């Protein structure tokens, strides 16, 4: 199928598992778990999604109430004056004013032969399912943002510690350079070079130190709390990552992406609206009944002689409404085609998103392997320099230079690790973040829903058939 094309031949490792509902638990970080729970409980970004879902649920009740059997109770008391010049003048009746009392219970049953009310209820139910999927998408967006921000803070803390070690090593080197320049062993340029190195290292340190409160403010906004109310975070090592994709990626992705599910249900709702618009071409048949009491003498209103009743069918023929019905049906078909196109786009975008994140993660994983080799080589150079210092063959400057190189390589490795975690979280989001929609059969077409007089509908695109 065309939906699988963006994932065909994807050069990424397989054998992974799909994310679980609480996918962040795989990192085994109590702080992160606590933040995710707080975000889900009180985050303002989910309020709108919850309200849309509630409205959609109420719409189902409203659609159900509009069809089938309906009843209505009426009660009224009127005092009326007869005209003296009417069909029956009041002087012949012997009174001018009289009271009229009516109590009635009316029933109406609409025979939904053409499925109009049923389609209305189904469309409301599909819209509710779409709203529920959108709520899941909003939840996924929130949880991934919390995790990404949290691990960004942890990465900054790790790199800040490395920056501090680098500054300390360069300050030691600056002290040695200043002594050698003061004794005339080295030229003043050596000291200036050491000054520049320290300034650059302190700039990096300031950048990481300043990034921490920014990330805390962003995390507080995601949790719906002020930065001052944020709990004290504890720095922890960054977790390991798994770049493997699930084996059954393909079409199973359609059932695991809440945005695709929402688009799918919107197609179903649009299809039901098309069915409803088609049913408008056919006559409405209903049965009405009434039972009650009516009397011009209020004292006798509740007596058996005041009983009234009636029953009879009603037929509505849309003979003079065909132009308007055709226009409404054309609108429903245009909305169906637009929903199907949006579904197609969501499927392709989702596959592209998975492919992009998976390939990026695989690339970063390969770079991390190469960077680990560079760190190992730098450590070997540091050990060699330390051995020379112990034997008195060299002074501390070579050891400090090797130490700074190791710290720089470790910082680069930490940056790649942080990038890998961020990409893994993005891949989790692309895979649906544990969302699972059952009954993921492709939406049916409306090709057999042509209205009378050959008003032909538009069929769904291939991916929705």
Image (spheres, rainbow, N blue to C red):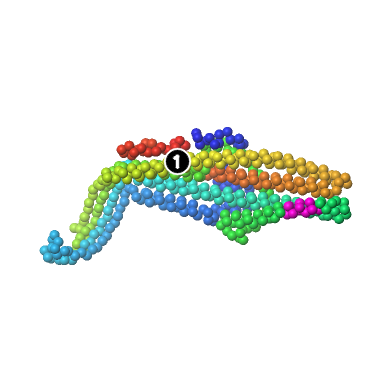
Alpha-carbon neighbours of circle 1 within 10 Å: few (<14), some, or many (≥20)?
many
Q: Position of residue 456 (x, y in %)?
A: 36, 37
**Residue at 43% of width from left, 52% of height from top?**
55
| Residue 200 highlighted magenta (yes or no) | yes
How many numbered marks appear?
1
Q: Is residue 354 above or below residue 175?
A: above
Left or right: where 240 falls relative to 449: right
Label 1 element class: helix
- Residue at the location (68% across, 55% down)? 209
Residue 290 drawn above or below residue 342: below
Q: Relative to the observer, which residue lies in front, 36 or 292?
A: 36
Residue 97 is left or right of residue 49, and the answer is: left
**Can residue 115 be spotted in the picture?**
no
Q: Quadrant of residue 245?
A: top right
Name the dominant secondary structure of the magenta segment: helix
**Residue 306: % across, % down:** 20, 58
Quarter containing the C terminus = top left
Q: Give the residue at mark 1.
A: 340
Q: Quadrant of residue 178?
A: bottom right
Q: Position of residue 329 (x, y in %)?
A: 36, 43
Asked which quadrant contains residue 231, the reply is bottom right
Asked if the stretch drawn in magenta spans residue 174, the answer is no
Magenta segment? 191-202
């Amino acid at each position: 199928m065309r939906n699988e094309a963006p994932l065909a031949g994807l050069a990424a490792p397989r054998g992974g598992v799909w994310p679980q509902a609480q996918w962040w638990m795989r990192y085994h970080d109590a702080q992160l778990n606590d933040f995710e729970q707080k975000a889900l409980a009180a985050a303002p970004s989910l309020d709108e999604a919850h309200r849309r879902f509630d409205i959609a649920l109420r719409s189902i009740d409203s659609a159900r109430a509009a069809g089938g059997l309906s009843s209505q109770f009426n009660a009224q008391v009127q005092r009326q004056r007869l005209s003296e010049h009417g069909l029956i003048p009041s002087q012949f009746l012997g009174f001018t004013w009289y009271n009229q009392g009516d109590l009635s219970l009316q029933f109406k049953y609409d025979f939904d032969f053409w499925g109009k009310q049923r389609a209305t209820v189904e469309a409301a139910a599909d819209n509710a399912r779409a709203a529920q999927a959108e709520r899941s998408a909003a939840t996924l967006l929130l949880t991934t943002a919390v995790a990404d921000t949290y691990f960004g803070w942890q990465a900054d803390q790790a790199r800040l510690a490395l920056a501090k070690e680098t500054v300390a090593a360069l300050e030691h080197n600056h002290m040695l350079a200043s002594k050698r320049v003061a004794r005339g062993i080295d030229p003043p340029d050596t000291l200036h070079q050491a000054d520049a190195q320290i300034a650059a290292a302190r700039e990096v340190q300031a950048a990481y130190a300043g990034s921490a409160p920014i990330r805390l403010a962003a995390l507080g906004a995601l949790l719906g709390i002020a930065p001052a109310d944020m709990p004290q975070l504890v720095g922890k090592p960054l977790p390991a990552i798994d770049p493997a994709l699930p084996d059954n990626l393909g079409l199973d992705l359609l059932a695991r992406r809440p945005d695709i599910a929402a688009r799918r249900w919107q197609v179903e709702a649009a299809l039901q609206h098309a069915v409803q618009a088609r049913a408008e071409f056919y006559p409405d048949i209903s049965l009405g009944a009434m039972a009650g009491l009516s009397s011009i003498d209020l004292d006798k209103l509740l007596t058996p002689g005041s009983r009234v009743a009636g029953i009879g069918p009603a037929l509505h023929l849309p003979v003079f409404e065909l132009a308007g019905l055709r226009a409404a049906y054309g609108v429903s078909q245009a909305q169906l085609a637009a929903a199907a196109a949006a579904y197609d786009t969501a499927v392709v975008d989702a596959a592209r998103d998975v492919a992009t994140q998976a390939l990026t993660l695989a690339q970063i994983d390969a770079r991390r392997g190469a960077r680990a080799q560079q760190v190992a080589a730098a450590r070997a150079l540091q050990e060699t320099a330390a051995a020379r210092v112990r034997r008195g063959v060299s002074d501390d400057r070579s050891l400090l230079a090797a130490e700074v190189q190791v710290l720089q390589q470790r910082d680069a490795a930490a940056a790649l690790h942080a990038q890998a975690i961020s990409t893994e979280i993005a891949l989790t989001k692309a895979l649906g973040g544990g969302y699972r929609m059952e009954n993921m059969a492709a939406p049916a077409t409306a090709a057999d829903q042509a209205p009378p007089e050959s008003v032909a509908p538009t069929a769904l695109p291939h991916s929705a058939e």
